[in-house]
Amino acid sequence: LGAQRLNEVFSCFVFYGVLLVVKMYAVAIITGQVRLRKKAFANPEDAMRRGGVQYHKEDPDVERCRRAHRNDLENILPFLFLGAVYSLTGPSLFVARLHFFIVFVARVVHTVAYLLALRAPTRSVAYTIGQMPCASMALQVLFSVITYA
Amino acid sequence: LGAQRLNEVFSCFVFYGVLLVVKMYAVAIITGQVRLRKKAFANPEDAMRRGGVQYHKEDPDVERCRRAHRNDLENILPFLFLGAVYSLTGPSLFVARLHFFIVFVARVVHTVAYLLALRAPTRSVAYTIGQMPCASMALQVLFSVITYA
Amino acid sequence: LGAQRLNEVFSCFVFYGVLLVVKMYAVAIITGQVRLRKKAFANPEDAMRRGGVQYHKEDPDVERCRRAHRNDLENILPFLFLGAVYSLTGPSLFVARLHFFIVFVARVVHTVAYLLALRAPTRSVAYTIGQMPCASMALQVLFSVITYA
């Protein structure tokens, strides 16, 4: 029974974790599309292929995409670790799912708010809400393994 | 028998995953060497130690290394998660190894193409090929856990 | 007995891994505080909310925080993978704990040295010391799974 719940919780984590990875991939694809549309390439060899070295330049819309992506690296990637080890601590499926679901929705809202430049503090609020289950998981995991420090 | 295959697939994933981490470390070391050779340091305290604050500057070769490294963060780190959970879904060793091997080779080619500024679209093609097994793994994992959403 | 030691080693890894994630979160919070204090925001919509578009600007102290954070992404995130798979190779608890503890202390020193701009090479020495257990873990893991390549 314990093994079954662990499996359910871990599978639930994997579901939202993989969805968030797919969401990150979407930001990468959008960045590439914005580079093509604005003709703003990070590398001279790319610019040469797309019309000339003058397109090796920065662009504010591309930089916005890159900031959204970097924020994902800073927050989604640690979640992929925290969620996995939190699943192993034996939480109830309901509470665990709540943690994962809040992180998932908050990070989707964060990305939308970033890419569409929604009015502040939409993005920051989404960021903060998404970090709360992460802080909760971090604390619970720390307490469960503190005797092994 | 099922446990044995799972162990074989996971070990195969770990092999290529660790090799890719070592590859990322190599990019970090190369970046440091280029900083020393071009005398271009990100921090004033480093520049002071290497001859003066005038060496606190940006350099196009250093920036190229940093872009290659950042692209690794965006793609290799999610693979370390995707490959692990994909291994747990019980794929055949042959198919799983093919996924991991393509990611590995594509990311090595991506790094070489980036650092040597090979003619476009060499780097982008390597990037796209490396993302295909990742997309395949993401989809397979999602299908296998979708009932736990 | 083998399962118990594996559990002890893995729990020890989880303890230091989660502490390092918390340390990364601390850098993110510090970055936000420095942005508010120096009035230097990455996004126009944030600057508008804090007094005007003129505060959409770069700041050397903010950039320093961001470099510290990025270095964490480059090194702590791969450790979260390496430490996990190294734990599965069955090392002694003493040796494993030594690896994790050195990484932890070195990364804390690295962050302090970065944020306070301590004299070079304090930061680089901390970086190098922290990478040594990581290289050791990478090699041990590679040897333990090389037959599955």
Image (spheres, coloured by chain):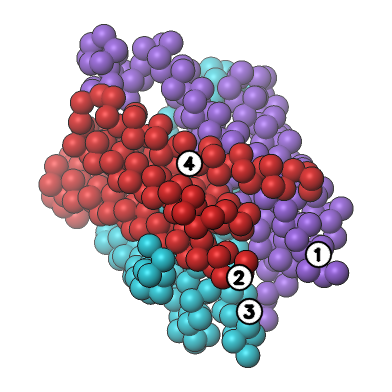
Chain colours: A red, B cyan, C purple
**Chain identity of mark 3:** B
Reply above or below: A45 against C111: below
- Residue that mark 4 sits on: A133
Q: Looking at the rendered structure, which numbered label has been put on residue B7?
A: 3
Q: Is residue B114 visible?
A: no
Nearer-N-terminus badge (2/4): 2
- Residue that mark 2 sits on: A1
**Chain identity of mark 2:** A
> How far apart are labels 4 and 1 at the CA level?
29 Å
The local crowd at label 4, few if under 14, some if 14 to 19, many if 20 or more residues have their Cα within 10 Å, is many
In the rendered image, residues at marks 4 and 1 fall on the same chain:
no
The local crowd at label 2, few if under 14, some if 14 to 19, many if 20 or more residues have their Cα within 10 Å, is few
Q: Nearer the viewer, mark 2 or mark 3?
A: 2
Name the secondary structure under disc 3: helix
Instruction: Tell me the kind of residue under disc 1.
Output: Gln
Residue pictured at 46% horizontal, 17% vertical: C34
The local crowd at label 1, few if under 14, some if 14 to 19, many if 20 or more residues have their Cα within 10 Å, is few
In the rendered image, residues at marks 2 and 1 fall on the same chain:
no
Foreground residue among C11 and A57: C11
Name the secondary structure under disc 1: helix
Foreground residue among A90 and C60: A90
> Badges 1 and 3: C-beta atoms under 8 Å apart?
no
Residue B128 picture location, percent across and down: 31, 65
In the rendered image, residues at marks 1 and 3 fall on the same chain:
no
> How far apart are labels 1 and 3 at the CA level?
19 Å
Name the secondary structure under disc 4: helix
Reply above or below: A123 against B67: above
Foreground residue among B71 and B14: B14
Q: Looking at the rendered structure, which numbered label has been put on residue C4?
A: 1
